[in-house]
Image (tube, helix red, strand yellow):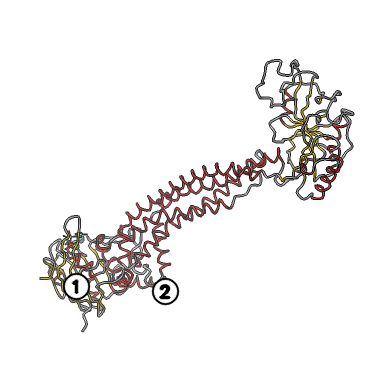
Amino acid sequence: MTPLIHLTGITKTLKGQGEPRSILSGVDLTLHAGRSVAILGRSGSGKSTLLSVLGLFDRADGGRYLLGDKDITRLPEQRAAALRSAEFGFVFQRFFLLKHLTAAQNVAMAFVNGQGWLPRGKRRARVMAALDLVGIAHLAEHRPPRLSGGEQQRVAIARALVREPRVLLADEPTGALDTETGALVVDVLRDATSRGCGLVLVTHDRDHARKMDDVLELREGRFA
Amino acid sequence: MGSGKLRSALVIGGQGIRARKLRTFLSMTSLFLGVLAVLTVQAGAEIAERAMLSGVELTRGKDGTLQMFVPQEEPALGVVERTLAGRSDGVAVVGMNAIIGEPGVRPINDGAVPFDHPRVGGPEGGSGKPDGQAIEVQLEALTGDVRGFRPFRQVSGQWLDFASAPALAPRIVVNEEAAIGLRRHRVPGEMALPGAAVHVTPQVVGVVEDGSPRPSVYVRMDELRTWPPGSSNADTSRGGSRVQVMLSPSATDLVQTLRSRLIGVGVPADELDAHPIDSREELEGQLSLVRLIFLGMAALVLLIGVAGILNVGLATVGERVEELALRRAVGTSRLLLAGIVLAETLLTGLLTAVAAIGTGAAGVKVGSALLGPSYPALQGISFPWQAGVAGVVAGVAAGVLGGLVPAIRAARIPIAAVMRA
Ligand SMILES: Nc1ncnc2c1ncn2[C@@H]1O[C@H](COP(=O)(O)OP(=O)(O)OP(=O)(O)O)[C@@H](O)[C@H]1O
Ligand SMILES: [Mg+2]
């Protein structure tokens, strides 16, 4: 069976002010549909860098990136944007919600991106379904400043899920939450895999990592 | 279902503007002033031109009027008078100086200068006559109603009546400066022409505004003729004096008749060319420099407006880095995002231009209604459409200039760097 994601020998060098630094030096990763993988690693080990390569925010310098049977190692910006919209959902440590929009409008952002337009009614139905999935449909009209951290992160997860992506990428989604709320959020994320979505969870918390199907540790730019 | 780029752009742009009402308002204000400055200069130049032209019209005649200069001597003068008698599309004007008041004295405004003019020369002046209660005026004798060419405004009383039989006591219409002289200096009501032996007592029937700073008096030529008998006009012997004949541009037959009759009495044909008055062209030369200077100033103000938009736009992009990166993360393309940022300022610029044009048009309307009665140049003035076009162009240009840099910056935001927790 073709894996959902197949990385081989991914390298990434970042040049800041000083010397160029090799962050990723040959990462291999395979993720199947409906499966989840936890990525552990010290701070600065390159977990977020790997996630931005996975999510097409950034390009790998070397190696190969297959999504299904498509080679997407090098994509023009327009196609990358289309894939980000259709195939990926993102959740971050900071929730990245827009303060001036309601929870529903924040979720609807995933449809307001010039990548296929849904009429208002259909859009609304999809948004409400996604909010319901993460258990906060009743908060649809609230703006982020009036929501708790856990609720905000669930709005962000609803936004990541609303277009029914094939891959869910989460970068320390529990980092800003207390243990209990964090556990709830991880459960919500893992539930998505039961509907066939692949999940990559970057975390520092071994308890959360244990809930995933696989656990990998990033060390010196590769998985040990 | 289409890609919905436009609709997405509208929603994102609308949300952006609503989230930053104050900023949008501020950038609109700076641009508003810039566009209004451009409009003011355009409209101002237009009005100034009209005002100058209407002043020139009063003294020189309307643009397009044909002018002919005929020697001021018999028999040519008589031919002119007879040919133009009873016509309104051709009027001859004979100008001379005259003195109203005590005979044989030096007038208060020697040389028919304005009354507030400082007097030149010693107490005796150049004439050797003693000072006395008399004023000197520029006398213009008319064969018909000159107002068809020089649109005088009646200040009080009546204008000359050319339809009735000539009166023995000449009726005169004075301009405002002459009226001031007559009022201020209680001069006897006698009028003398240089060289004429007989003095008469003219009857003032009205006051007009004629655009001249010098005191002037208008009189029917035939009434003037009844008055120093024999010597038709005392001053005609002064060599080189000419009668000004004003003719309507459509009066080609009259021009022909007049020319052939004058040639018939021996006036050289090459002296009888009728030239149209073209004050606008002459004025435009003078005005274009003024216009250029003011346009430069307006451009400067507009540039400040652009800088305002640019400033606000850049600050906004800085503030929106997260939003823009997030929008790209959920699949909005660089190009669309840059387009949205540009469209926001473009829309702001366009709306501002429209608002400024509306304000300008309303200002012109109110201004002409309020000031029209006292400043005839502002009467019936409409908002110059060139100013409207200039406003829209300025607004759009400001929007593009002020939005382009922020748009490019927005497109360059690296998602990965922003999203790194
Ligand atoms: N734009 C950049 N230029 C140069 N170096 C960078 C840049 N971004 C990140 N780095 C460096 O790359 C390394 C990996 O960063 P990354 O954010 O991937 O680490 P991480 O594993 O996610 O750490 P954390 O657990 O703290 O989030 C870090 O040492 C960081 O300093
Ligand atoms: Mg990280």
Looking at this view, is B8 or B151 the one in front? B151
Q: Label 2: state its secondary structure.
A: loop
Please, which chain is the residue tagged with disc 2 on? B
Task: Indicate the amino acid at tag 2.
Answer: Gly
Residue A122 horizontal side relative to residue B365, left or right: left
Mark 1 crowdedness (10 Å alpha carbons): few <14, some 14-19, many ≥20: some
Residue B132: image location, x then y, percent: 75, 17
Q: Nearer the viewer, residue B136 or B121?
A: B121
Rendered location of residue B227, percent (x, y): 87, 29
Please tell me whether residue A6 is drawn above or below residue B19 in the rendered image: below
Quadrant where the image shows the N terminus of chain B: bottom left
Residue A124: image x %, image y %? Answer: 38, 70
Q: Residue at x 12, y 63 (%)?
A: A42
Secondary element under disc 1, as helix, strand or loop, is strand
Horizontal side, residue A14 vs residue B158: left or right:
left
Q: Chain of mark 1?
A: A
Judged from the image, the quadrant occupied by ligand 1 is bottom left
| Label 2 beta carbon less than 8 Å to ligand 1 | no
Q: Which residue type does callout 1 highlight?
A: Gly
Please determine if labels 2 and 1 lie on a single subunit.
no
Dot 2 and dot 1 residues touching (CB under 8 Å): no
Left-right relation of B103 to B38: right
Mark 1 vs ligand 1: CB under 8 Å?
no
Q: Is residue B251 or residue A23 the one in the foreground? A: B251
Quarter of the image that includes the C terminus of chain B = bottom left
Q: Position of residue A168 (x, y in %)?
A: 24, 72
Using the image, tell me which numbered label, if any, was put on residue A63: 1
Residue under pointer 2: B2
What distance separates the C-alpha of mark 2 from that of mark 1? 35 Å
Q: Is residue A131 visible?
A: no
Instruction: Tell me the quarter of the picture where residue B266 sits.
Output: top right
